[in-house]
Amino acid sequence: MCIEGRGPLQIAKALRENHVLTPTAYKNRKGIKSPSTENADPYRWNANTVVHILERLEYTGCTVNFKTYTNSIWDKKQRDNPEENWAVFENAHSEIIKPDVFKKVQEIRKQRHRRTRTGKSSMFSGLVYCYDCGAKMRYCTTKDFEKRQDHFVCGNYKSNTGSCTIHFIRAVVLEQLVLNNLQVVISYVTAHENYFRQVMTEKMSLKSSEIIKSAKRKLTQKEKRLAELDRLFIKIYEDNVAAKLSDERFAMMSEQYEDEQAMLKSEIVSLQAEIAEQERQAENLELFIKRARKYEGLKELTPYALRELVKAIYVEKPDKSSGKKKQKIRIQYDLVNFIPINELLQQKKQRETA
Ligand SMILES: [Zn+2]
C-alpha cells in the first residue's frame, strides 16, 4: 500500500475497514503478553503503528541488536542508538518482506511530500525534477481543475523573480511520456535480455565475477599480512624489553610496521568497498531485468509499477524550434540509472539492415 502511494493514515484506515486486528488486539487473542492496553475497537489502527511496521528492518529477516542503549546502571532510561551503531545480522530468520520492497518503502518514506490543500496528489509527486536546475518540480492542482489541467512546474520558477524557467508539463502528458518510455524499455529488455545485460554491464562498469574473485583473494592476503604485523610487533617489543633489540632498532622497525599497517588498512577498506559495490550493482542489474519481465506487456501505468521501475524523471525545457512545442523527459531507472535506449534501438536497426 505504501508503494502504491498511500500514507500511514490511509493505510490505517484501510486496515480498519478490512477488519485487521491491531497488534495489541492480536496479541491478546493469542494469549501473548503486550505492554499496551487494548482499544475498545480492536481494528482501530494508529498511523504511528503503521509507520513502525513500515520501518521495521527485522521483517526482512534480519536480527537487529543495540537499537537502544542505556547510559549506565544508574540511568536505566532506554535511548535510541543511531542507525550506524546497530548490529544487523542478515538472514537470521525467514523474511516476511522482500528486502528490495523494504528498501523502496524507505525511499518513499524519506521523500514524503506534502499533500496539496485540495487533498489531491499525483503518483509522480517527489519523482519529477527539472533537468536544467535539478530542483524538484512542484505539483499544481486546484479543486476545480480537471485531471488534464494538473501540471508540474520547476520549483525554482516564480513568475518574475525565480532563478529558472517554468518547464511546465501537464500531468497527463507526463504520464503518457513515461508510459511510452517504459514500454519501449520493457519490450527491449525482454526481447534482447542478453545483449541488454552485456551493454549495461559495460555501462555500469561492472567487473566480471573472475575479477571480483581475485579482489577477494587480494583482500584475504592483506588481512593475513595485517594479522602477521600485529604478531611481529609484539615480537620486537618483547625482544626490546629482553634487551635483544636495541631501542634505536626497535624505534625504526616499529615505525616501518606502523607505516605498512596504515597502508594495509586503507587498502583493505577500499577493496572491501569495491567488492561490495560490484556485487550490489550486479545484483541490481539482475533485479531490474526481473522487474522488466514482470511488467512485460504493460498497458497502463500504476503507482506500483512506476515506483518499482523509476527512480526519478527529469523534465527538459520545451523545444519550440520546430514551431510545435516538443518536450523531452529523461528517466532515471530504479537500480540501473539511465538506459541508453535510443542507442540500443539504433544498433538494433543497424544489425537488422546489415
Ligand atoms: Zn529548473
Image (cartoon, helix red, strand yellow):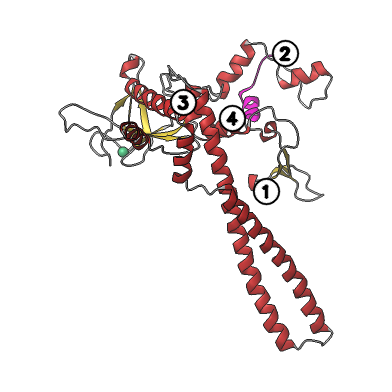
Q: CA distance from mark 4 to mark 2?
A: 33 Å
- Indicate the secondary structure of the residue bearing disc 2: loop
Nearer to us of marks 4 and 2 is: 4
The residue tagged 4 is: 101
Where disc 4 sits, the SS reads: helix
Looking at marks 1 and 2 on the same chain, the residue that comes earlier in the sequence is marked by 2
Mark 1 lies on residue = 85
Labelled disc at residue 40: 2
Instruction: Report the Cα–Cα distance between label 2 and label 3.
Output: 39 Å
Looking at numbered disc 4 in the image, what kind of residue is underneath it?
Val
Residue 127 magenta-highlighted: no
Judge from the rendering whether residue 280 lies leftward or rightward of residue 21; answer left or right: left
- The span shown in magenta is 41-54
Label 1 residue SS: helix
Q: Mark 3 sits on what residue?
A: 306
In which image quadrant can residue 244 be found? bottom right
Residue 47 colored in magenta in the image: yes
